[in-house]
Amino acid sequence: MMKQGALSRRRTKAALGAWVLWLSLGALRCSAVPSHYELPALPPGPQSERVRTSAEVSAAGRRVLADYGAPELATLGFLDVTKPPYSARADGVTDDTAALQRALADARDARLVLWLPAGTYLVRDTLQCVQGAINLRARETGPRPPSEERLTATDYPCVIRGPAGPKRAVIRLAPDAPGFADPERPKPVLYIWARRWTPPYDLQPNVSFNQMLLSVDLDIRHHAGAIAVDLQGAQGTAVQDVRIEADGALAGLRGLSGSGGSTHQVTVHGGRYGVLAAGFGDFARLTGSQPAPLLAAATLTGQTEAAIYYAGRGPLTVVGARIEGRGIVCAATGPNYNGALSVIDSSVDVHRGEAIVANRPVYLANTFIRGVKAPANFPSGDAPALSAREWSHVREFAGAPAGPFPIWIDGVRQASSFVADIAAAPTGPPTDLLARHALPALPAWNDRGVVNAREAPYQALGDGRADDAPAIQRALDEHAIVFLPKGRYRLGRPLVLPPGHKLIGAGRRFTGLFPAADTPAFADAAKPQPLVDTAETEDAETTLALLELRITRLGAHALRWRAGRNSIVRDVDIHRTNGRGSQGPDVLVEGAGGGRWFNFAADQQIHGASDYRPLLVRGTRQPLVFYMFNPEHARGDAMTEFVDARDVTIYALKGETYEIGHPASGTRPQVLARGCRGFRIFGGGGICGAAPGSTPWVYRFESSTDLVVTTLGHQASSLFGPPGTWSMIADVSAAGAVATPSDEALVLYRRH
């Protein structure tokens, strides 16, 4: 074991070496990132207009459905690009660019998932889809959708999906495709973005919602200026299960999603960069990510510049990654809350360069490193030494350059700039590091054993009028995997997920469940009932995925979760539209509740009762893990509350502690944990603070033990009080009270 005290003789030499290294890499870091990046022109036509009314888009969607050659698939929620009128060949020879481009825009307008069957789609130009602005001030015409919806831009996402099995959909850039040869003027192959909702209706990633790329591979080899995917978004936006071949190309990914979105299970082989999370050219003002991005279960190998180049907003959290070749560069610009890094359960095998070069804080846990002499290199500050020839197991390391980046251990602000617990690992990393954080298998509607609740004998309607609860419940009771096609499913009573059963929709804004207005089950506002309930079980693989839980009655809440460690909640949209006076939580996790939750976002601008919570976790003992945690804007006493909970882990948290549009209403704390044990937050950001007269803390722990919080910062805001009037962390225990200053971006807060 290599402890801090044993390294004191090496500090001066290590610090000098790191400083020389930083100077030598400075010119490379500035010149390696391109200076030009232009927004490609959209194809001409009405679907590319800067702003349209909801009625205009709905009319376009109806025309799409009228022309579509596979209406039975449309009723399920899918537009197959190989069906007429698109008729993509996917043979690796025919140019499918026009077919894919038309299908992208049509699927968006018709509110369908663009389905790419297995095959190779040859393209010669950028494919792009824009989530367009909707003019809500224009007078609506035509029929209004069921359940009293008023569709906005967020209801028209671009969602692309292929089969997740061994036979995959591959988008391949043609060898002679023009415009992809210049690394100084890079060009994306797949570009998914969103327009600003107000003039001039230009690019704005923080309103890119619910846009997804699932189980689609890309091949951009031997195009020096090519970027495979550019998708930088916020709530509900995700890149998942994507494989990229990038030898001789610029980058696999440009940009990372945060703020309720994430990037999960991406493999990039080759390229100058695996992930290039930086803003440059036309994108310079947008940085490289939305706040507090998450990169999980990633495999990045064979890059020539950096596996990850991060210059994004807030801290980056990397969990379950395998990196081989080049390491990570964190080159933050602007305020101190940008550019920090947390790496957990990962391996970094460096063939050339350094493992991590950073100008902001770095935290490592259970990470294995080989090929370098230090876990991280800073322009100033100390770092421990490693054996470059052998694997080192970094059980914990926290370090930072000079600045307001403190380390807190057991209530004491440390004088040292780093802490380290490092040991030799002669056998190398465990083989299951990445698998621990891999995405769970997600059955498609056409997989064997999947039952459609709209088909006989169940015949749910999904028309927003009939009570579909009996039909769906019968399907759930009789089959292990139930698919709910696109539609609005009105429930007269809660659905109960049996142990180990799976309920899967077409998409988080395409398949929606909401409570009936005229049923006793959801009539009592004082005792709200869940739209979906679960059986109490510790080990079953109960799953809820790709749908929306829309709360339109005070007598309803979204979800009660009592399934344990093996359960899954994946990309479920929690959406409350009736909340003034709401009581109880939208999501309640209790009893045997736990499991893995992916992209939990609850943006609820709700004036509820003082104890209203978007999320309440109480009395749990099963491991509960969130891969991106984003509740914000709610008006209870705290945004989220954990009471007597054990073993809670949050990978990447983004919050906003005030109500958009009503700053005078004050701010609300982000997390309240009472009587908890084993509570961990890796990477926290967003517009989190306390306004004058509001509760003067953002995170509060009461009588809680075994706490770990890393790379925590907040975006400065005129809404918040002076730094000396509030704290980021308030920790109250029998040992006393601790309050961390709000003008510091701490590296690590740990208490046993």
Image (cartoon, grey):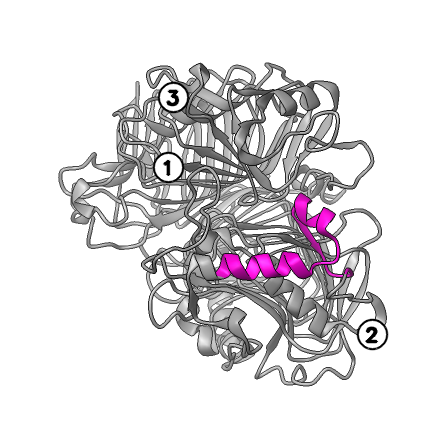
Give the camera-side residue of 524 and 457: 457
- Please tell me whether residue 131 belongs to the stretch shown in magenta: no
> In this image, 362 relative to 190: left or right?
left
Q: Please give the label number shown on residue 94.
A: 2
Name the quadrant containing residue 137. Answer: bottom left
Mark with earlier residue (1, 2): 2
Mark-to-mark CA distance, 1 and 2? 47 Å
Identify residue for label 3.
555
Q: Are marks 3 and 1 in contact (CB under 8 Å)?
A: no
Q: Please give the label number shown on residue 577.
A: 1
Q: Main secondary structure of the magenta part?
A: helix
Name the quadrant containing residue 453. Answer: top right
Residue 84: percent from left, percent from top: 76, 63
Give the camera-side residue of 155 and 737: 155
At x 20% / y 48%, what residue is drawn?
720
Can residue 12 be seen in this snapshot?
A: no
The residue carrying pointer 1 sits among few (fewer than 14), some (14 to 19) or many (20 or more) residues within 10 Å by Cα, namely some
What span is in magenta? 57-83
Give the camera-side residue of 407 and 322: 322
Name the quadrant containing residue 478. Answer: top right
- Tell me the amino acid under the disc marked 1: Thr
- Tell me the amino acid under the disc marked 2: Thr
Secondary structure under tag 2 reads strand
Residue 277: percent from left, percent from top: 52, 64
